[in-house]
Image (spheres, rainbow, N blue to C red):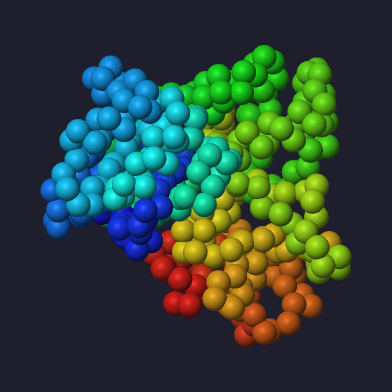
Amino acid sequence: MIYREHYIRPVREFYDSDLIKIITGIRRSGKSVILEQIKNEIKQKTNNLIYLNFEDKKVLANIKSSDNLIEYIEQNRKDGKCYIFLDEVQMLDNWQEACKTLRLYDNSIFITGSNSKLLAKEFTKELSGRYVSFKVKPFVYKEILEYTKELGKECSITDYLVWGGFPKRFEFNTEDAKKRYLNNLDDTIVINDLLNRYKIRKENLFKNFVNYILRSNSRIVSAKSIHNYIKNKNENCSINTIIKYLGYLEEAYIIEAVKQYSTKTKSELAYYSKIYNEDVSFNSIRCIDNRYDLTHNLENIVYNELIYMGYKINVFNKNGKEIDFIAQKENKQYYIQVAYSIAEEKTYNREFSAFANIDNLSQKIIITNDDIDYSTSTVKHIKLKDFLIMNSLEEI
């Protein structure tokens, strides 16, 4: 597996801190591998380490409570600072109490947990002021190229646009095998985890809602528009339930809802958000007859890549003219439009017109899958294949 320095670097500053280090994110995004890589790095300077994987039944059979965990650590640690690694710790009841106690006794604690039970709101509440968290996402394209090279394989940009970046899927050689793995993963992450966790009784309603949302990536949605869709499916559901369901998907790292920003009101429009899937495969496995939504998946991919680069993202609206992204970092701001192709004149005019009346103090960018350079004196065109290997927009 590739070394994911991008995620390890910010954790490194806290190796010796008494704060609990939480590596979180969607299932199968590579959290356990990163935990293992951190452990191996620390192992270079000390052998005072303890690693426990709570998906291992032998571990759970012997450590059944938070008191058992404290006792085990005390019996097996050496003198001096001990580095404790707890993988999938949410499997242990009251793990928070054990971690809060252990951190007081010269222990440096690292934990991972899946989206089914270790959610941001939980460790915020239970470990307030005692933790730092680091979110891991599926592979971006630079990581895919590195990993597939390691596997002796290749991955085209189109393959990425359709099947996304869950690491395990690159081990399969056929499309049928990829689909089977991703469908099973979807059943676990999106349906089973959330139905069980939140004890959702209206299973069919929830599944219809999830299918609609995950096919609506890179689109503006509102609670009302979702409610209307559900009603047309002859399902009974309140707008409050829709808002609650959206919260479930966000809490479990399945989607991110990006607020729309309007210069006219100088405020975020609270009832409208643009939905981006954590991985575009959530859209593709719901497509029929291989009619994949490459246009919206491309925008979703650009969003995920910008987040990986460290940009804060908003959707921009000025007098009804929407610009896909305002990307901000270190006092620099970029206006970004995304399109699959602007080769046709009508599409070219539509996409470039979004920049009308935007001053030139900020860089204006359009990203497409075209091979021809369509840059103008005021707008920089970036080819998707070039964007995907960038580390920063400052490289343009």
Is 337 positioned to the left or the right of 282 in the image? right
Is 64 positioned to the left or the right of 380 in the image? left
Is 23 positioned to the left or the right of 288 in the image? left
Is 104 positioned to the left or the right of 148 in the image? right
The image quadrant that residue 78 belongs to is top left
Residue 114 spot, x, y in % from top left: 44, 34
Residue 286 appears in the figure: yes
351 to 63, vertically: above or below: below
Residue 53 appears in the figure: no
131 to 68, vertically: above or below: below
Nearer to the camera, 127 or 38:
127
288 to 12, vertically: above or below: above
> At 62% across and 18% down in the image, what residue appears?
199
Residue 268 spot, x, y in % from top left: 78, 59
The image quadrant that residue 313 belongs to is bottom right
215 to 39, vertically: above or below: above
> At 55% across and 19% down in the image, what residue appears?
196
> At 77% across and 75% down in the image, what residue appears?
356
> At 60% across and 46% down in the image, what residue appears?
256
Residue 360 spot, x, y in % from top left: 68, 84
Residue 178 spot, x, y in % from top left: 37, 31
